[in-house]
Image (cartoon, helix red, strand yellow):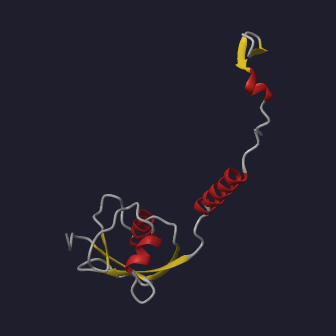
Amino acid sequence: MSRTKIIAAGTLAPASLLTSRRSLLPSPEISETHEEALKSLQTYKKKDADKVIVRFKAVGKAPIMKQNFFKITSSNRFQALIQFLRKELGYKGTEPLHTYINLAFSPAPDDTAANLFKSFQTDNHLIVNYSTTAAWG
C-alpha cells in the first residue's frame, strides 16, 4: 500500500495518477474536431432557403390548373407538394390523385423538393404530372 494513496472516502488510486503532470484539458486536435462537428451540425440544421420552381401538368382527365408554375421552398417534402396540389384542385383525401416526375415515376413522399430538382430538373424547373387514374407503374 505504499504506492497507493487515499483520494476520497474509501477510494484508492495509484500514486502515479496523483503526481502526473498530464493536462486534463482537451488537446488542440480534439477541440478542432469538436468545432468542425458543431459547424457541420449547424449547417445541417439550417433550413434550405432556396426556392424551387415547380410546374404542374395535368395528365388524362385531370383538371387543368389556371396557374401551373409555383415557387416552393426546396426543403419541403414531396408530401407537401401533394397536399398543396390537392388543395389547389379542391380534391379531398378520399379522391384519387397520382403524381409523377417527368411522366416517369412517382417519388416517395419523404423525398425533398431540392433532391428531386437536382436530379430531375427540366428547363430549370421540376415538372410534376398529376392524374386521377394511375398512368404509369
Q: Residue at x 71, y 15 (%)?
A: 12
Instruction: Indicate left or right for 53 with 34 as reference.
Output: left
Q: How many marks?
A: 0
**Residue 11 drawn at (x, y percent):** 72, 14
Q: Residue furthest front?
A: 2
Residue 7 falls in image quadrant? top right
Q: Residue at x 33, y 67 (%)?
A: 107
Q: Is residue 3 above or below residue 121?
A: above
Q: Residue at x 47, y 72 (%)?
A: 114
Instruction: Indicate left or right for 7 with 33 as reference.
Output: right
Residue 57 falls in image quadrant? bottom left
**Residue 39 drawn at (x, y percent):** 66, 60
Residue 136 falls in image quadrant? bottom left
Q: 119 or 1: nearer the eye?
A: 1
Name the image quarter holding the N terminus.
top right
**Residue 64 drawn at (x, y percent):** 34, 82
Name the image quarter holding the C terminus.
bottom left
Q: 75 or 17: nearer the eye?
A: 17
Instruction: Indicate left or right for 69 with 13 as reference.
Output: left
Q: Is residue 103 above or below residue 33?
A: below
Instruction: Indicate left or right for 10 with 98 as reference.
Output: right
**Residue 63 drawn at (x, y percent):** 32, 78
